[in-house]
Amino acid sequence: MEGRCIMRVVKSVAEMAEVSRELRASGKTVGFVPTMGYLHAGHISLVKAARKDCGSVVLSIFVNPAQFGQGEDLGTYPRNLAGDVEKCRMADVDVVFAPEAAEMYPAGYATYVTVEGISDRLCGASRPGHFRGVATVVTRLFNIVRPHRAYFGQKDFQQTVVIKRLVRDLMLDVEVVTVPTVREPDGLAMSSRNSYLSPAERMASVQIYRSLASARSLRESGETRAGVLTQKVRENLSHEPMFKAEYVELVDADTLLPVQSADGRCVIVLAVRLGRTRLIDNMPL
Ligand code: AMP
């Protein structure tokens, strides 16, 4: 019987590349879950999906400086490596890759990856350079880990579209798998950033899911006009004065371009500010 190895925690890029070579050489499919840590059930659902499909699971924990803008929360982003390692052990991860920034971006690092167009819209509009940072780190992680499959959450919908385009355009030999959003019992999408919310903000935050769900009900009752569906979301959000909506849009699921009518595969995407916290969510219609 093939026994599973003890989970390894790897810090160096060279060692991670070597471990991946060994996994591939032993005939195992490598499933990869990139994260910024402070793991929650959403991350673990990606691990479970990878565990189901793949002979080995590598999870990376790296708070990527390149995807944070000036004045964003890089310095305060929640971190708990020991807790994360324990959660990975419980979830049957084979390798945790937790490099320092100097490992990922050594002195003289100069190459960045930009997925044009879709990186500039929605979250990219208020976070210039964010998706360049994401595309760069994911490309580098893919080259280090060399996964057969990589797992990303629907929660960060624009990110999944950017990564799929990156993989297609650069002909990267990896299958991108999108995993449904895991929510708290009251509907709030799980996120490491939820830890920033005050109790009052946390209570208010349920309105995000409710507003998306109200648009979905409207769609199910036959409404297809984008303006009406997004207005329903905005109206619901406005019940909670703490919110500042950054964007609410109905977009094509593949191109992220705005659509006038919810006939094809489309998604309502939104970003709101709740106090000092920026939250995103979306719902396929
Ligand atoms: P993060 O650590 O926030 O960068 O997220 C790492 C991965 O986990 C990304 O692919 C996210 O989309 C995914 N993820 C984060 N939150 C959730 C969630 N609530 N449900 C499913 N996937 C999630």
Image (cartoon, helix red, strand yellow):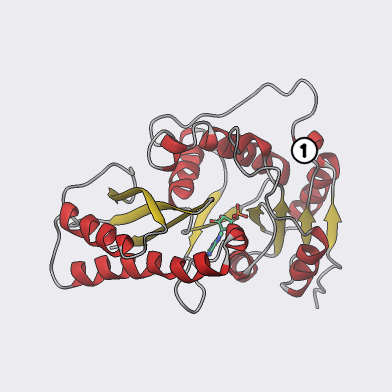
Residue pictured at 71% horizontal, 62% vertical? 56
What is the quadrant of residue 3 in the picture?
bottom right
Q: Position of residue 53 (x, y in %)?
A: 59, 67
Q: Position of residue 203 (x, y in %)?
A: 48, 71
Viewed as shown, does residue 61 lie left or right of 181? right
Q: Which residue is mark 1?
A: 101
What is the quadrant of residue 117 in the picture?
top left
Q: Is residue 87 above or below residue 32?
A: below
- The verdict on label 1 being within 8 Å of ligand 1 is no
Q: Position of residue 191 (x, y in %)?
A: 57, 61
Q: Tag count in the figure?
A: 1
Residue pictured at 60% horizontal, 26% vertical? 112
In depth, the one of 218 and 285 nearer the eye is 218
Q: Position of residue 47 (x, y in %)?
A: 64, 66
Dot 1: within a 10 Å radius of its alpha carbon, few (fewer than 14), some, or many (20 or more) residues? few
Q: Quadrant of ligand 1?
A: bottom right
Q: Is residue 243 above or below residue 124?
A: below
Q: Quadrant of the N terminus?
A: bottom right
Residue pictured at 74% horizontal, 71% vertical? 92
Residue pictured at 59% horizontal, 64% vertical? 46
Disc 1 element: helix
Q: Quadrant of the C terminus?
A: bottom left
Viewed as shown, does residue 1 lie left or right of 244? right
Amino acid marked by disc 1: Ala
Viewed as shown, does residue 254 lie left or right of 226? right
Viewed as shown, does residue 240 lie left or right of 48? left
In depth, the one of 43 and 211 nearer the eye is 211
